[in-house]
Image: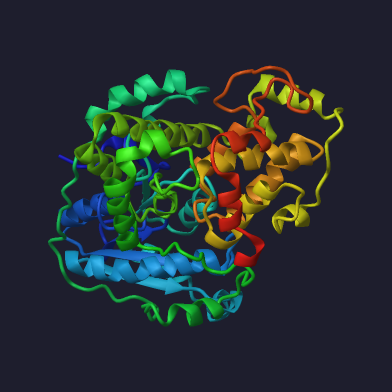
Amino acid sequence: MTIVADLRIHAAEQPPPRTNGELVLYWMQTTQRVQYNFALEFAIEQANQLRLPVLVYHGLRHDYPWASDRIHTFILETVGDLYHDFEARGIQYVFYLERTGDDADARRGAGKPSPLVDLARRAALVTTDFFPTFIVPRQIKALRAKVNTPILAVDSATVVPMKYFEREHATAVGFRPRLMAALPEFLRPLEGAEPRIGRKVEVPFEPTTPTHDGIPALVASCDIDHNVPPARTLRGGPGAARRRLDHFIESGLPRYEEDRGDPNEDATSMLSPYLHFGNISPHEVVLRAREAGPPAQFAKFQDELLTWREISHNFVYHNRLHRTVDSIPGWAREELRKGEADPRPVIYSEEEMELGQTGDELWNAAQRAYLIDGWMHNSLRMLWGKAVLQWTPHAQEALRVLEHFNNKYSLDGRDPNSYGGIHWIFGKFDRPFYRRPIYGTVRYQSLKAAAKKFDVARYVMRHSATAI
């Protein structure tokens, strides 16, 4: 019996595994971990049945949207952990770093396919990570067009598989009961299998094996945006993710409900970058937090981690327009359209906002948190986004700016949870409120009112311009 539920598997109409394949290939994309990785476990299971070796291929291209030193560094730090973790499980893992477009041009000029295409053509079966946004869907589609090998994408991103919900849910009120009812079926410890065939697979390139001291030089050699530096405090990898989880369970979870809204307190998990890159599984986080308790604090944390994260995946999975204003709820879209005629307090240029040079000190400090740390406290993300809505001429421009800043600077950007959070600014998952200029009945939040909730001066000092 398979350990991976059918609801986790996404496949185009594909033939069964090729009988003359040399291996089963797991093409790692967004689930960058060894534990609680359903695509990996499915690959091992299929390889054992076919009596073939399993190979994990992980590649990093230079031309993905918003490619930068920050994202590259986080991934390369992750790779160092992965080599160690896969070796401990007896699984062959190889990493390919494409530095510039010349790499691909040279291969094509020599009549050679990419390393991924080469390996996929030799495989009996390819498994990969299912991810409903960013470049992942089109990358899978592109590989399917180039090879005859069956390619199955497996959902390791959510606790309850995205396919479990047959439609998009507009609010958490309707989504939460169904999610909670499904947890007993899907929220279980996962014991990984071991590959039975241990022979090594020959690969068509020299794998890159990053060391901590060598990562800056590797990043510098890549044709990416070198103006976005590595995050000041966040290090990539499953090891760093587990250390962060340990810290949260010990010091943050016991006071989560009371202090999570204060950005000056270290009471939130700060796991969103690690969840985005798949360094840690939501299964492991929830199971560890549940075991640690206390029950009241865990219940609130579970709601934040599961309900709001998984409804965002539900939104992005079912709504192909999730990067556009067309996915804003109809009532909110109409309210914001009417508000376009209202005078704005000020219109800032994109550059002024990007550099944190507006007239509001708190907003500037929050933007600098993105610029320097690659992460922003969720309470401030809401204030940050709502302000941009009144500093731009219309919702379409506000959405474009928020997506760009979030995806360029935040380590948890380019993610379903990011798009859910950004669209909440425009009324997604929300209800109408008291009517105001510009916003209409879309919820308004005041930067000035934040002083009643936390020590604004302390936060601004921590993220002052001198800290850059």
**Which x, y percent locates residue 444?**
67, 28
Q: Quadrant of residue 299?
A: top left
Q: Nearer the viewer, residue 165 or 396?
A: 396
On the picture, is 22 further left or further right than 459?
left
Examine the rendered structure and indicate whether residue 66 appears above or below residue 87: above
Examine the rendered structure and indicate whether residue 67 appears above or below residue 314: below
Examine the rendered structure and indicate whether residue 50 appears above or below residue 111: above
Q: Quadrant of residue 75?
A: bottom left
State how many labels appear: 0
Q: Which residue is drawn at the image coordinates 38% and 71% (left, top)?
A: 95
**Which x, y percent locates residue 244?**
34, 55
Q: How is the image coloured?
A: rainbow
Q: Nearer the viewer, residue 215 or 230?
A: 230
On the picture, is 92 further left or further right than 462?
left
**Which x, y percent locates residue 20?**
27, 62
Quarter occupied by the C terminus:
bottom right
Q: Nearer the viewer, residue 328 or 262?
A: 262
Residue 125 visible to an observer of this rendering: no
